[in-house]
Image: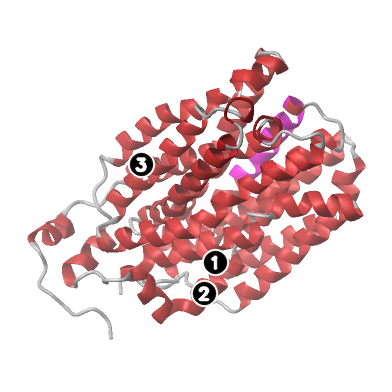
Amino acid sequence: MGPSHTPASPQASAATTSPANPVRRVAAASLIGTTIEFYDFYVYATAAVLVFGPLFFPSDNETAQTLSSLATFAIAFVARPVGSVVFGHFGDRVGRKTTLVAALLVMGISTTLIGLLPTHASAGALAPLLLCLLRFGQGLGLGGEWGGAALLATENAPPHRRALWGTFPQLGAPLGFVLANTLFIGLAVGMSDEAFMSWGWRVPFLLSAVLVLVGLYVRLNLVETPVFAKALAERAPVRAPIAEVFRRSGKVVVLGAFSVLLTYTLFYLTTTWSLSFGVSGLGYERQDFLLMLCGAVVFMALATPLSGVLSDRFGRRPVLAVAMTGGGVVGLLTGPLLGSGSTGLVMLWLCLGLFCMGLVFGPIGAYLPELFPTTVRYTGASLAFNSGSILGASLAPYTAVRLAEAGGVSWVGWYLTGAAVVSLVALALLRETRTASLED
């Protein structure tokens, strides 16, 4: 049985008469929050490849250092489903706005504190332990951030523009990536390697505190989404959203997680792993390869809203199916293009991969929320999206390093193609949601 109906509280009634958030405010609040969150996440990803190995996991074996560093990168992806349950609980009971602010704070504080950590040279084994703890905090915050930002966009959107509005938080991914890596490029060019390894790597983490203050200012000026306010006025919130999600939509959570498997695998292979491979395997200078990635991620930024427009016109599943097929083809091209070492072919592989990433990433901002009822939408959409991170991202860079060592770069490509096939199968078992109502 569902929750019993109770009379609307004065607060809930007032919420239903509050004006909807205008499009510019929704776009700014969902975009800036995920930009900050992804900036924080990418700062760590880049540092994990470039500096965390020797600073926190010193070893005579450079590969062992890299693998240890990338293993800590995976911790946040394990934490993300936990964040989905914790923040989803309050997002479905208290509201989207308050929960979004809390998620932003957890992520931002964790990132800032990483910039203050002692290294192994001064703190011994305590240093990597603290790094792992704060990395878990990053994942916890992002586990609550994405779902709330996606709901903020889609629950305020006109029905025929939900996929396009759902791309607002998705655009935070390429923007956060460019912001983080442009800063790393500037530091690499503007200081010596010794200064960068000594203190320069801390700067991007410490700057996160400034970005969080900006994000808080924008989000505190929001009102609750009209869809959630209406649901709260009509019935009491679900007592245990996580239990209700698995009672009503357990199969959808599982299929949703597998449907985003390619999203994570594609992105973290074309960014985190490719950076490691480009520097250590192909001999590129760190700042040169970062610059190539910043150029290629523009294609992701262009493809993301394009996929939203197409999804509103043709449906979520057809657009996602084409994008996933494209991702599988990129996997087959990994050996011939990336493995060639030619700058032009490497750049072509990066651009193709990130363009397909934008196409597959864009519709998800609307598609996953549309699969769940209002009373558990925060928990359900967040849990599906972030459980996919364990499957597709947590071990992707680590696995790719192992595969490249064992069989060459083509094996990494087959790994990517396999992820595309799994996501296509999951998508085929999910329903179309373009005409679905968000009010239930």
- Up the image or down, 126 lies above or below 244; here it is above
Give the label on residue 24, or none: 3
Would residue 179 be visible to someone looking at this image?
yes
Q: Nearer the viewer, residue 153 or 96?
A: 96
Q: Which residue is label 2 attached to?
A: 432
**What residue range appears in magenta?**
287-301
Residue at position x 56%, y 31% in the image = 179
Residue 83 on image: x %, y %: 43, 56
Instruction: Identify which residue is drawn at 50% across, 65% down.
Output: 384
Mark 2: amino acid: Glu
Residue depicted at 9% across the width and 72% down the height? 7
Front residue of 60 and 236: 60
Residue 192 vs residue 306: left or right? right
Label whose residue precedes the other's in the sequence (2 or 1):
1
Residue 23, image x, y percentages: 35, 46
Q: Of label 1 and label 3, which has the lower sequence position?
A: 3
Q: CA distance from mark 3 to mark 2?
A: 28 Å
For the residue labelled by badge 3, is the local secondary structure a helix, a strand or a loop?
A: helix
Mark 1 element type: helix
Mark number, residue 316: 1
Q: Where is residue 412 shown, x and y percent of the image?
A: 81, 55
N-terminal of the pair, mark 3 or mark 2, is 3
Vertical placement of residue 93 versus 106, above or below: below
Question: Tags 1 and 3 in contact by the CB under 8 Å rule?
Answer: no
